[in-house]
Amino acid sequence: MKMSTGLTTVLLGGGRITNALVAGLQLAKYDKPIIVHDRNPGKLRQLKKQYGVAVEPSLQRAVEQAGLVLIAVRPDSVSDLLREIRKLEIDKSRRPLMLVSLAAGIPLSKLRARMPSPARWARAMPSPVCRSGRGLTALTFDRPFSSNARRDVRELFEKVGTVLEIPESQFDVFTVTFSSSHGYHALAALAASAQRLGLNREIAMTAAAHALADGILSWRESKIPLERLLQEAATPGGTAAAAMKAMDSSGYQQSIRRGLHAGMARARKNAKRA
C-alpha cells in the first residue's frame, strides 16, 4: 500500500477484520500510512504479500509510530494486549495515545480502566463487507476524544463505506443486527431449500441471491417504502404470499429475535471477561 505523509494508523492484530479493512482501504486508494502489528509472523508475511502493507513485528515500534491505534484482536485478547501496551516505554511528551477498539461487547468504561488517561478511547464496529467499499461502521467516542481525532477516525472508516455515530448503549444491538452473517446465512438456507426442491446449485444460488441482494438493493436505491415493496412482491393469493405466511407461522420472526438476543448475551459475556 502506498505510503505518504499524514496520520499513521496502526492496526494491532492481523486477523479477519484487519484483512478486510486493509483490502477496502487499498481499493479506495487510501494514501496515509498504515502499519500492521501481530505476534504471528505468518499473518504479517501474508498481509505484506497480499496488500503490500507495512508490517511491524515489534509492538513497541508499532505503537511509537502511531497517530491512531486500532485494537483489532478478539475480545478475549484485549486485556492482555492492553497490559503489554502499558508496559511499553512510550515517550511521555508525545500527545495522548488515541485508541479505537474494534472488539465487540467491551464498553468504554472497561477500556478506560485497562488503559487510563492520558489515553483517549473510541469504539468502532466495522463490517467485513468494508473490503468491497460497501461497509458499514458504527462509531462512539469517549468524551476526551478530540474533535480533530474524531474527524480522522470518521474519515478513515468513510473510505470503506457508510459511517454512523451512535450512543454506546446501542452498540450491542447494532453489532448483532448489522452482521453480514445474516445475509450469508439466509442465502445458504434459501438456496439449500431450493436445491432440495429440484434446482441445481448454480441456479438455486442465483435465484436466492437475487431475492436477497438485488431486492434489498432495489429498496435502498428506489426509496420506496418497504411495506409497499412487500405488497408488490407478495400478491395476495400468490406463491410469494403463501411462502411468507408459512415462514411466519413456523416462527421465522421469533427465530430472528432469539438469534439477536443470543448475540447480545455473548457481547455481555465478552464485557464481563474483559
Image (cartoon, grey):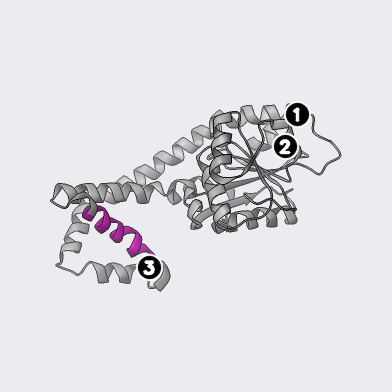
Element class at badge 1:
loop
For the point 64% across and 58% down, the residue is 155
> What's the CA distance linking mark 1 and mark 3?
50 Å
Residue 245, position in %: x, y?
Answer: 20, 57
Region rendered in magenta: 203-218
For the point 49% across and 38% down, the residue is 267
Q: How crowded is mark 1: few (under 14 residues within 10 Å), some or many (20 or more)?
A: few
> What's the CA distance linking mark 2 and mark 3?
44 Å
> What's the CA distance linking mark 2 and mark 1?
9 Å
Callout 1 touching callout 3 (CB < 8 Å)? no
- Closest to the camera, between mark 1 and mark 3, is 1
Look at the image and say whether residue 216 sits in the magenta stretch. yes
Callout 2 touching callout 1 (CB < 8 Å)? yes
Element class at badge 3:
helix
Quadrant in the rendering for residue 165: bottom right
Question: Which residue is denoted by mark 1 in the rendering?
Answer: 88
Question: Which residue is denoted by mark 3 in the rendering?
Answer: 219
Quadrant in the rendering for residue 96: top right
Regarding residue 248, the answer to whether it shows in the image is no
Q: Which amino acid does label 2 sit on?
A: Val
Residue 175 image label = none
Look at the image and say whether residue 76 sits in the magenta stretch. no
**In the rendered structure, which disc, 2 or 3, sits on the residue that comes first in sequence?**
2
Residue 63 image label = 2
Report whether 126 appears left or right of 199.
right
For the point 65% across and 52% down, the residue is 2
Query: What quarter of the picture does the C terminus occupy?
Result: top right
- Closest to the camera, between mark 2 and mark 3, is 2
Quadrant in the rendering for residue 154: bottom right
Q: Relative to the observer, which residue lies in front, 105 or 73?
A: 73
**In the rendered structure, which disc, 2 or 1, sits on the residue that comes first in sequence?**
2
Residue 250, position in %: x, y?
Answer: 21, 48
